[in-house]
Image (cartoon, rainbow, N blue to C red):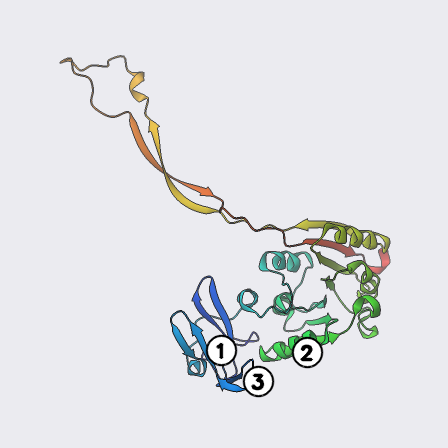
């Protein structure tokens, strides 16, 4: 699997998504061997409800569909809590991400948002993504290379709240995204990173108190258009319903009996089929609050 361009056939060392059902998908790497929990090299066999799959046998198989960040979000290995597609779509829209944009992301985490950002900015843009955890940063760096998108992203092991986004990025970015426990500490560093033409800012926080403190910091540093929102993705289920209806057209006529004294035939009570929408019994819960703001251009600050 390559996010840089679609392949026609599976090759060794590819990452493929094994689709068993809509709620049963798995990302696996096509290698003949893997290391088990005891540190020994064993045959790479993936167990499914349909039987055991010898993974290397996938080599030469035709791909069923083009890989996408949305599929990767559903199947990626979770190193941290991740951001899902409903929030990702709003983040990309509000940050005004487009091909050629230069974007800062902190923290990298499991790379769910990173893949969507890279798809939006390539092939002339660049993502600078930061994580304070060294192992997670290295794993993300290797993952981007495996997926063929390493040229569009630079991964940093760095605590941005204390040390900023490096001096090399000062005055060079169009958008900043933060997924941090204390995003307000990184707001002053974001100010330095924006281009003289300004840019867009977003912070993702699970608690409203974090969003409040972030908004206060944004206001202190002269950001404008500050707003916080919550995205709830709610599905509607369509199903047919059969409703009895009473036809009252017969009351419009005075004559209720035929000439021979018999009452007219027909049943005024009929059943009609309609299509209605209902919500599922279990609705998705809270994920996080998205705080957006604009850093104005230099001439209007």
Q: Which residue is mark 3?
A: 39
Camera-side mark, 3 or 2: 3
The percent coordinates of residue 30 (x first, y second) are 49, 81
Q: Which residue is mark 1?
A: 7
Q: Residue furthest front?
A: 38
The percent coordinates of residue 50 (x first, y second) are 38, 71
Circle 1/circle 2 CB separation < 8 Å: no
Q: Residue furthest left?
A: 260
- Image quadrant of residue 120? bottom right
Rounded to the nearest angstrom, the CA distance separating label 1 from label 2 is 26 Å
Rounded to the nearest angstrom, the CA distance separating label 3 from label 2 is 20 Å
Q: Which residue occupies 77% across, 55% down?
A: 294
Task: Looking at the picture, tell me which residue is in the foreground, 266 or 252.
Answer: 266
Dot label at residue 295: none
The percent coordinates of residue 250 (x first, y second) are 29, 19
- Image quadrant of residue 119? bottom right
- Left or right: where 169 falls relative to 96: right
Dot label at residue 138: 2
Q: Please rate how many residues cluster around mark 2, counting C-alpha atoms within 10 Å: few if below 14, some from 14 to 19, many from 20.
A: some
Circle 3/circle 2 CB separation < 8 Å: no
Q: Please rate how many residues cluster around mark 1, counting C-alpha atoms within 10 Å: few if below 14, some from 14 to 19, many from 20.
A: some
Rounded to the nearest angstrom, the CA distance separating label 3 from label 1 is 32 Å
- Image quadrant of residue 118? bottom right
Which comes sooner in the sequence, label 1 or label 2?
1
């Amino acid at each position: 699997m390559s996010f840089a361009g679609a392949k026609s056939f599976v090759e060794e060392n590819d990452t493929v998504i094994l689709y068993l059902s809509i709620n049963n998908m798995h990302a696996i790497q096509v290698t003949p061997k893997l290391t088990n929990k005891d540190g020994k090299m064993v045959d790479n066999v993936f167990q499914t409800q349909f039987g055991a799959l010898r993974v290397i046998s996938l080599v030469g198989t035709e791909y069923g569909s083009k890989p996408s960040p949305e599929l990767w979000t559903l199947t990626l290995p979770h190193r941290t809590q991740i951001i899902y597609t409903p929030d990702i779509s709003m983040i990309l829209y509000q940050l005004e991400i487009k091909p050629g944009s230069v974007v800062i992301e902190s923290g990298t985490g499991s790379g769910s948002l990173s893949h969507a950002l890279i798809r939006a900015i390539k092939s002339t843009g660049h993502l600078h993504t930061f994580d304070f955890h060294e192992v997670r940063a290295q794993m993300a760096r290797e993952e981007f290379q495996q997926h063929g998108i390493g040229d569009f992203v630079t991964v940093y092991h760095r605590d941005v709240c204390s040390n900023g986004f490096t001096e090399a990025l000062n005055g060079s970015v169009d958008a900043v995204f933060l997924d941090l426990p204390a995003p307000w500490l990184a707001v002053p560093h974001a100010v330095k990173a924006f281009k003289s033409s300004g840019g867009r800012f977003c912070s993702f926080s699970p608690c409203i108190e974090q969003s409040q403190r972030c908004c206060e910091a944004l206001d202190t540093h002269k950001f404008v258009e500050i707003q916080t929102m919550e995205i709830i993705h709610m599905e509607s289920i369509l199903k047919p319903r059969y409703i009895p209806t009473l036809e009252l057209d017969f009351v419009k006529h005075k004559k209720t009996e035929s000439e021979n004294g018999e009452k007219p035939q027909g049943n005024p009570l009929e059943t009609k089929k309609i299509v209605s929408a209902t919500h599922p019994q279990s609705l998705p819960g809270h994920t996080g609050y998205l705080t957006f703001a604009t850093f104005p251009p230099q001439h209007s600050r």
